[in-house]
Amino acid sequence: MEINLSARFKKSFRRLHPRIQKKAIEKTVIFRGNPFNSRLDTHKLHGDKKEEFAFSVNNSYRISFIFFENNNVIFTDIGTHNIYK
């Protein structure tokens, strides 16, 4: 699986506490193996973001992403539930 990072994701990631960054990297490893692993709580978003999915980094933080053809994904943002707005 090829994971691309949006500029917004990169900016949001840099602003996170190093502990959250480390946890996000750990969850990305699981994501690469199976995007719908039960430990990720992957779910489809609704409304304006209906083309996106998100998975949990921990109880507060999520990574939003979009699936593309040929097993490609782009991470669009990372943060608390505010990323859904």
Image: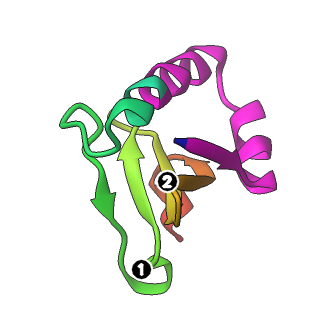
Query: Which amino acid is tagged 2?
Result: Asn
Q: Residue furthest left?
A: 38
Q: Position of residue 38 (x, y in %)?
A: 18, 37
Q: Residue at x 80, y 44 (%)?
A: 11
Q: Residue furthest front?
A: 70
Tell me which segment is drawn in magenta.
2-28
Q: Which mark is residue 50?
A: 1
Q: Which mark is residue 20?
A: none
Residue 77 seen in render: yes
Q: Residue at x 36, y 78 (%)?
A: 46
Q: Provide the secondary structure element on which disc 2 rests.
A: loop
The Cα–Cα distance between marks 1 and 2, rounded to whole angstroms, is: 19 Å
Which residue bears the numbered disc 2?
Answer: 71
Query: Which amino acid is tagged 1?
Result: Lys
Q: Position of residue 2 (x, y in %)?
A: 60, 43
27 inside magenta stretch: yes
Q: Residue at x 37, y 70 (%)?
A: 45
Q: Who is closer to the viewer here, 35 or 11? A: 35
Q: Who is closer to the viewer here, 85 or 29? A: 29
